[in-house]
Image (cartoon, rainbow, N blue to C red):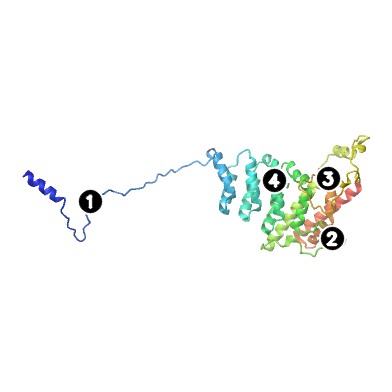
Amino acid sequence: MGSQKKKKEKKKDFVKPKLKVGKTKPKATSYTELGFRAKAIGIPEQSITKTHTSRETFDHHLSLARHHSHSTRREALAYLQAHLPEEVDSSLFTSISPLILDPTPTVRAAALSLVRAIPTSSLAPHVHLISLYIHSGMTHLAPDIRADSSKFLLFVLKAEDADIPMQLVTRSWEKTLHCFGSLLGWDLASPPPPGSSIPAGSANWNKVGNATSIDRIANAAGHLDALSLFLRLGLSENLTPEMRAQREVPVYHADTAKHLIPRNATAPYARLGLFVEDKGRRWTAVSSTEDIGARYQLLKGMLPGILVGLDSGRRQGGEIGRNCKYLIDFLDKVKAETEKLQ
């Protein structure tokens, strides 16, 4: 019995199973089960407070501000605005300042919103860097970027800390005026002859890309608002009566004039051109005009071109005309007061 049973078991290994129609083929004894099941673990509540924001995550989103995708840049700026630290370092300004020239309008709007959210104390040391990109935007080839440049400029000029706009006024007075000339289509380098004027409607403020007429008027009004505020900050000052009296009667030493460089001196260093005015000079990036008198002297050569451009805007009427009329009256008043002091 035992030997027959062993023979049947050995023979069973070599028996070919019969397959029947409609029946599943039996699995081999060496078959390995490869199926698996995936289960998700759901966490209903997660904290998104600032306490979970690390410096590494902030720096990662800061690097995304230079991403090739405009949607990624916009989302990165939104994240940076929502997780701004109390003290902002220079890396943030280095990354977001070039976005003033970004070709996508939504990215520029997000950059402006982020700049407005930065504490004023952190903005003051970086005004020069921001002003470089603002000037580049005012003279940019893209009309949309030129149109948005005055929004960034107005933000700097309206800063709560008075030192911030005055940095722009004292360090970049001449350059900013030339940028306004390019922005508004005024030729400030070669003033027009007396009595001449620009035909109404020919200024660049009426030609802002494919914008509608309402947008063009809004852009022009924004440019004029920025110009008006810039001129008022640079050519007027709020002095108390005591300060004004002290300014009108300066106290100098009797021998002060002996130690000053003569205005018309050309010798003995004439060959170096140290005291020769360069008639072809347009502007310098480091022009320092700390006082109103120096700023007016730089403005004086551009004043005819500015007044001609403002007169063309005044004849257009509407909001642009009112803004131009206000600027003309202000400049006439400054001119009269300056000539009276001289």
Identify the secondary structure beneath mark 2: loop
Question: Mark 2 near mark 4, Cβ–Cβ under 8 Å?
Answer: no
**What residue type is disc 3 on?**
Ile
Residue 129 has which mark?
A: 4
In the displayed structure, 259 sits above or below 334; it is above
Mark 2 vs mark 1, foreground winner is 1
Residue, disc 2: 192
Residue visible at 70% across and 52% down in the picture: 136
Residue, disc 3: 292
Q: Quadrant of residue 184?
A: bottom right
The alpha-carbon separation of the residues under discs 3 and 2 comes to 25 Å
Identify the secondary structure beneath mark 3: helix
Identify the secondary structure beneath mark 1: loop
Q: Upstream in the sequence, badge 1 or badge 4?
A: 1
Q: Upstream in the sequence, badge 3 or badge 2?
A: 2
Question: Mark 2 near mark 1, Cβ–Cβ under 8 Å?
Answer: no
Q: Identify the residue at the far front of this view.
A: 271
**What residue type is disc 4 on?**
Leu
Q: Identify the residue at the far left of this view.
A: 1
Count neighbours of disc 2 (C-alpha within 10 A) and say few if under 14, some if 14 to 19, many if 20 or more. Answer: some
**What residue type is disc 1 on?**
Ala
Nearer-the-camera pick, 127 or 214: 127
User: Residue 302 at x, y = what percent?
Assistant: 83, 54
Please state if 230 lies on the left or on the right of 276 as rendered: left
Residue visible at 56% across and 39% down in the picture: 55
Question: Mark 1 near mark 4, Cβ–Cβ under 8 Å?
Answer: no
Q: Is the N terminus in the top left, top right, bottom left or bottom right quadrant?
A: top left
Q: Upstream in the sequence, badge 2 or badge 4?
A: 4
Q: Upstream in the sequence, badge 3 or badge 1?
A: 1
Please state if 63 lies on the left or on the right of 225 as rendered: left
Please state if 261 lies on the left or on the right of 144 as rendered: right
Mark 1 vs mark 4, foreground winner is 1
